Amino acid sequence: MSSQLANLSEEQRDALQELMNVAMGQGADRLARLTETFVTLSVPRIHAVDVTNTSLLSQLMIASQPAIITRQSFLGRLRGEVMVCFGDNGADQLADLMGYEGVEKHSIQDELMLDVTNILTGACINSLAQQVDIKVSYGSPSLLSRGRSLQEVLGAEELRGHQALVLEIHFEVATHSFYCDLLVCITEDTVATVIEVIDQLLNDI
Amino acid sequence: MKILIVDDSAMSRKLVLKALPAELQAVVTQATNGEEALAAYHAGHAEVIFLDLTMPVMDGFRTLEQLKREDANAVVIVISADIQPQAQQRVRDLGAAAFVKKPITPEAMQAALYEVGLI
């Protein structure tokens, strides 16, 4: 099946990107409260990708680099999962920022990554769901991989039946910088809901 | 009134246009980043500027800083998805007349215009 998400018009892509911009603004606000710092947000960029053809992911900077990858599923009229790819030292940076040291720093890192995953997944998917007034429930975030690239991980994952959007976002937190990319995988049978969200946004203006 | 809307998103610029009250009789110019905004301002296309913060090329913070350096009386209303209290305080410190969170609504537009004394 050809990807409906890959065939979005420029107008539809702009609308979705702006929706994600608002969502990431809310995510950054929650992240700022978590870290008690000011978070500088980059312009989010969206690309549709074919998850069954991982060579397409090579266009993305993070795809071939070792990363910490977490995942969180969502269920309802919108179904799929979000994978969050943190830079290899992202956990370290975040733990430093929050003042953790020594043994405690290492034990807290996974928990911090999962907290951030929960914040970003919630912000991203809620923004889509609220637009068409649907309820979405969430699974618990979990650590998928550490030290492997997104390309390697996706090669091993069974993602047939999904279409995907990559949301590239860069957060700068005080003097620390960490980046993360979100891979939003949506099941084929609920992609129409995303298109409905976009079209409703465009109809509203 | 000459209005300049600065945002990299076409949809967001349309939302601002739609939220403007008809009685304002606005003549609108649009820009997609800070550099374009400064050029439009220098060309005399703006009495009021609606400015996004997160933009490529030149972001809203730098644009606001530059505008206020050149003209302390420039009327800038920031419209942004960056809702952190620190971001709102920073734009106030840089001289923004009002802050409106995205997505803008006609009610929020009315409130902002009232706050800066334009209606």
Image (cartoon, helix red, strand yellow):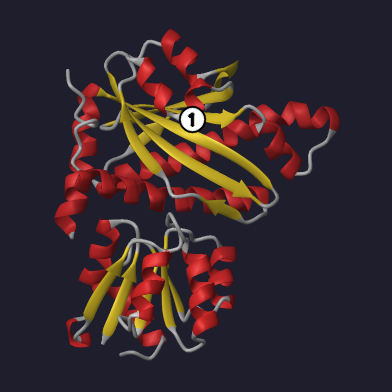
Q: Which residue is mark 1?
A: A61
Q: Quick check: B53 left or right of B94?
A: left
Pinpoint the chain carrying mark 1.
Answer: A
Q: Position of residue A28 (x, y in %)?
A: 53, 50
Q: Is residue A146 above or below residue A20?
A: above
Number of numbered markers: 1
Q: Residue at x 41, y 85 (%)?
A: B115
Image quadrant in which the C terminus of chain B is located:
bottom left
Q: Residue at x 24, y 32 (%)?
A: A5
Q: Label 1 sits on what residue type? A: Met
Q: Position of residue A23 (x, y in %)?
A: 41, 49
Image quadrant in which the N terminus of chain B is located:
bottom left
Q: Is residue B56 above or below residue B90?
A: above
Q: Helix, strand or loop at disc 1?
A: helix
| Relative depth, front residue between B60 and B19 | B60
Q: Residue at x 25, y 32 (%)?
A: A77
Q: Is residue A172 visible?
A: yes
| Relative depth, front residue between B66 and A172 | B66
Q: Is residue B105 visible?
A: no
Q: Quick check: B88 left or right of A6?
A: right
Q: Residue at x 31, y 56 (%)?
A: B9
> Based on the displayed image, in which of its 4 quarters is residue A87 positioned?
top right
Name the residue at the left extreme. Answer: A203
Name the residue at the top extreme. Answer: A156
Q: Position of residue B15 (x, y in %)?
A: 25, 64
